[in-house]
Image (spheres, helix red, strand yellow):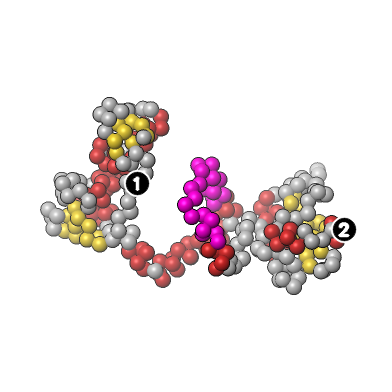
């Protein structure tokens, strides 16, 4: 039975400099038209002729995981990230440019370019799927993310404190370290939990029959999303969250998208 290969690991050598570039190509046969895709590599070879490049196949691979693993292996084995040896910038595999230091000037340039930019729904979906795939294929990536977050919150305690609200139930004169703690103590429902933060800016509003006030912490403004309107009453709300809180119904988003009823009314985005 013949082995089915889905791609290969290649080594390109720039003959005038003697330096190498390692990469992977997802093709079942050698791609004679392919000359590498690394940014640094492509910039370097633009100054040379194709005859100056020696192309070799190091290993054939039978799966995507095998392709990623072997690329990391060969880049490490041949030490092609060493500037005196090769042109590789990343560790390879599905890690992209992971491990490549980014200069301050480049960070500022990227920041300016992305300022005010809004991703399309397709872009958001692609980024989400990319992150999911990265986490599936690289268990170590998850560990690095968790380790980074723990380190960040330890070094920046205020960033975590702002997410933990200290609140007080006015009628009971009791303080709680979080909304969750208050709900568990008083037996409040999930929907009542969502509405407690609304009481901080609306003194006449009650949840569970009680008035609430914020002692410390910062409430994220969740009322800056899409505006919605109740078609029958013509009342407009600043967001789905606000409409859900005032109407004690969490299906308003679904009603806007599918045209069904929520709380006995029809809804739409405005």
List x then y, in percent, for residue 136: 56, 52
The picture quadrant where one finds residue 70 is bottom right
**Residue that numbered label 2 is attached to:** 51
Residue 172 seen in this snapshot? yes
**Front-most of 63 and 227?**
227
The picture quadrant where one finds residue 4 is top right
Quadrant where the image shows the C terminus: top left
Q: Earlier in the sequence, mark 1 or mark 2?
A: 2
User: What's the magenta region?
Assistant: 109-132
Q: Is residue 261 above or below residue 106?
A: above
Q: Is residue 51 left or right of residue 215?
A: right
Q: Is residue 47 magenta?
A: no
Q: Residues at badges 1 and 2 in contact (C-beta under 8 Å)? A: no
Q: Is residue 26 above or below residue 139?
A: above
Which residue sits at x=30%, y=28%? 231
Which residue sits at x=20%, y=48%? 202
Helix, strand or loop for disc 2: helix
Which residue sits at x=67%, y=64%? 89
**Residue that numbered label 1 is attached to:** 224
**Front-most of 156 and 2?**
156
């Amino acid at each position: 039975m013949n082995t089915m290969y889905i791609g290969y690991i290649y080594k390109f050598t720039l003959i005038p400099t003697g330096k190498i570039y390692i990469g992977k190509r997802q093709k079942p046969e050698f791609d004679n038209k392919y000359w590498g895709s690394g940014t640094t590599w492509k910039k370097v070879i633009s100054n040379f002729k194709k005859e100056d490049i020696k192309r070799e196949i190091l290993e054939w691979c039978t799966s995507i995981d095998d392709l990623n693993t072997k690329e990391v292996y060969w880049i490490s084995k041949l030490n092609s990230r060493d500037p005196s040896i090769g042109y590789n910038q990343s560790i390879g595999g599905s890690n992209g440019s992971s491990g490549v230091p980014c200069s301050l000037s480049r960070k500022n340039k990227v920041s300016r370019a992305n300022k005010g930019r809004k991703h399309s729904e397709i872009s958001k979906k692609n980024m989400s799927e990319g992150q999911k795939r990265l986490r599936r294929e690289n268990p170590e990536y998850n560990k690095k993310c968790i380790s980074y977050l723990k380190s960040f919150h330890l070094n920046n305690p205020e960033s975590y404190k702002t997410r933990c609200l200290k609140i007080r139930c006015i009628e009971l004169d009791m303080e709680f370290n979080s909304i969750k703690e208050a709900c568990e103590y008083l037996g409040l429902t999930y929907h009542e939990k969502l509405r407690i933060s609304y009481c901080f800016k609306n003194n006449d509003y009650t949840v569970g029959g009680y008035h609430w006030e914020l002692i410390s912490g910062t409430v994220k403004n969740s009322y800056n999303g899409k505006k919605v309107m109740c078609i029958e009453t013509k009342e407009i709300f600043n967001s789905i969250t606000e409409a859900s809180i005032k109407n004690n119904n969490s299906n308003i988003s679904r009603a806007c998208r599918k045209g069904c009823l929520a709380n006995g009314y029809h809804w739409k985005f405005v």
